[in-house]
């Protein structure tokens, strides 16, 4: 009897205690905007091979979505490890690049969205389902219009560039560059080394969902950091004044709220099965710290150790052992009374 109960308990163990299943593809696959159909995309991905990554040598499940808006194409890559990736579990990174040609008439821009996970079966596939639509539908027309207003000037002659906030240097490449990091709130100004470069803006955004429990209330926010890099080609163009204007344009017109909403919804759906109550009327707000975007539940969550810790993969095995020992102790006690 005890053996049968133990067997029943064993087969009911969540498989992510010992490993999770992830989508994997040997090669990237491509879709055209004009031929894109969400249901067909979903059906194709659902037929991709699935592997059990319970080997300590495996990094984690990863996915990369590449969007070329000029050629209107989507390229998706699934894998267990990308050599260039440094993301940890639950971290997402959006790399955006916009390039203006010499006559400032045509523009090309790209998005690369990457995600790493090890918290749910086929988590890399589910991430694609939550993000592919906004990536395809986003319109950067207004954003590029505002960029043009600060990155181009009547005179295209570049004689001097800033190499810090006040010092100037005559640059052989005739191209200036600037950089701002929200993590350290620091600026970098210099002469751009590549003389073949065009006017461009490169924005790297890292996001991770953080959950805290304070006084039996769950507080959920997205930790967000950005690095903004740009090049320009008129005299003394890479000063702090232009950089601050660029930062403001990114905050107002870059439309990161689309990624934040999709990222939060994806993460919340993955976690909600671990709570006794679902959140309702979740509100999004920006705190005084521009790098922290909060989602505040309107109801309290029971501060139960078991349910609050099931969202942490590392605690699964220890919780299972505790429950198993407790269960065996109860069974043993009942048999002794018979």
Image (cartoon, rainbow, N blue to C red):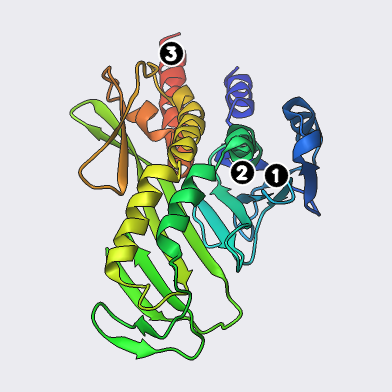
Nearer mark to the viewer, of 3 and 2:
2
x, y percent for residue 165: 25, 77
Q: Residue furthest top?
A: 338
Which one is nearer the viewer's eye here, 181 or 301?
Answer: 181
User: Which residue in the structure is indicated by mark 3?
Assistant: 334
With respect to residue 76, does 217 lie above or below? above
Q: Earlier in the sequence, mark 1 or mark 3?
A: 1
Badge 1 crowding class, 10 Å Cα cut-off, few under 14, some 14 to 19, many 20 or more, is some
Badge 3 crowding class, 10 Å Cα cut-off, few under 14, some 14 to 19, many 20 or more, is few
Name the secondary structure under disc 1: strand
Q: What distance separates the C-alpha of mark 1 from that of mark 3? A: 38 Å
x, y percent for residue 92: 50, 49
Asked where in the image residue 279 lies, by quadrant, the reply is: top left
Q: Residue sitting at 33 percent across and 64 percent down?
A: 242
User: Which residue in the structure is indicated by mark 1?
Assistant: 52
Which one is nearer the viewer's eye here, 148 or 24?
Answer: 148
Q: Quadrant of the N terminus?
A: top right
Q: Earlier in the sequence, mark 3 or mark 2?
A: 2
**Relative horizontal placement of residue 193, taking residue 226 as reference (left or right):** right
Nearer mark to the viewer, of 1 and 3:
1
Which one is nearer the viewer's eye here, 296 or 98?
Answer: 98
Badge 2 crowding class, 10 Å Cα cut-off, few under 14, some 14 to 19, many 20 or more, is some
**Relative horizontal placement of residue 105, taking residue 320 as reference (left or right):** right
- Report if residue 224 is visible in the image: no
With respect to residue 62, does 7 lie above or below? above
Q: What distance separates the C-alpha of mark 1 from that of mark 2? A: 6 Å
x, y percent for residue 130: 58, 33
With respect to residue 297, does 199 lie above or below? below
User: Which residue in the structure is indicated by mark 2?
Assistant: 19
Q: Residue sitting at 37 percent across and 43 percent down?
A: 252
**Relative horizontal placement of residue 99, taking residue 256 as reference (left or right):** right
Disc 1 + disc 2, Cβ < 8 Å: yes
């Amino acid at each position: 009897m005890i053996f049968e109960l133990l067997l029943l308990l064993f087969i009911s163990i969540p498989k992510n205690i010992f490993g999770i299943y992830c989508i994997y593809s040997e090669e990237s696959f491509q879709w055209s905007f004009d031929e894109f159909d969400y249901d067909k995309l979903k059906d194709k991905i659902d037929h991709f091979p699935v592997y059990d990554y319970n080997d300590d040598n495996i990094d984690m499940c990863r996915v990369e979505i590449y969007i070329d808006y000029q050629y209107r194409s989507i390229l998706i890559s699934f894998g267990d490890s990308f050599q260039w990736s440094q993301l940890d579990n639950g971290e997402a990174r959006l790399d955006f690049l916009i390039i203006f040609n010499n006559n400032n008439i045509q523009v090309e821009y790209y998005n690369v969205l990457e995600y790493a996970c090890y918290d749910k079966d086929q988590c890399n596939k589910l991430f694609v389902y939550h993000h592919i639509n906004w990536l395809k539908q986003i319109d950067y027309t207004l954003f590029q219009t505002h960029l043009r207003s600060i990155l181009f000037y009547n005179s295209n002659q570049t004689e001097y560039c800033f190499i810090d906030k006040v010092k100037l240097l005559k640059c052989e490449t005739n191209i200036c560059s600037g950089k701002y990091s929200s993590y350290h709130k620091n600026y970098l100004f210099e002469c751009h080394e590549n003389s073949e470069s065009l006017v461009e803006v490169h924005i790297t955004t890292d996001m991770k969902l953080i959950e805290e429990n304070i006084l039996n209330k769950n507080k959920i926010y997205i930790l967000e950091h950005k690095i903004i890099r740009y090049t320009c080609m008129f005299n003394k163009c890479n000063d702090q004044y232009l950089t601050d204007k660029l930062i403001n344009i990114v905050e107002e017109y870059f439309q990161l709220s689309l990624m934040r909403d999709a990222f939060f919804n994806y993460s919340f759906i993955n976690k909600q099965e671990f709570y006794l109550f679902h959140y309702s009327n979740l509100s999004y707000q920006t705190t005084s710290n521009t790098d922290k975007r909060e989602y505040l539940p309107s109801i309290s969550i029971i501060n139960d150790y078991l349910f609050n810790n099931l969202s942490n993969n590392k605690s699964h095995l220890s919780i299972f052992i505790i429950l198993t020992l407790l269960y065996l102790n109860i069974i043993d006690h009942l048999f002794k009374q018979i």
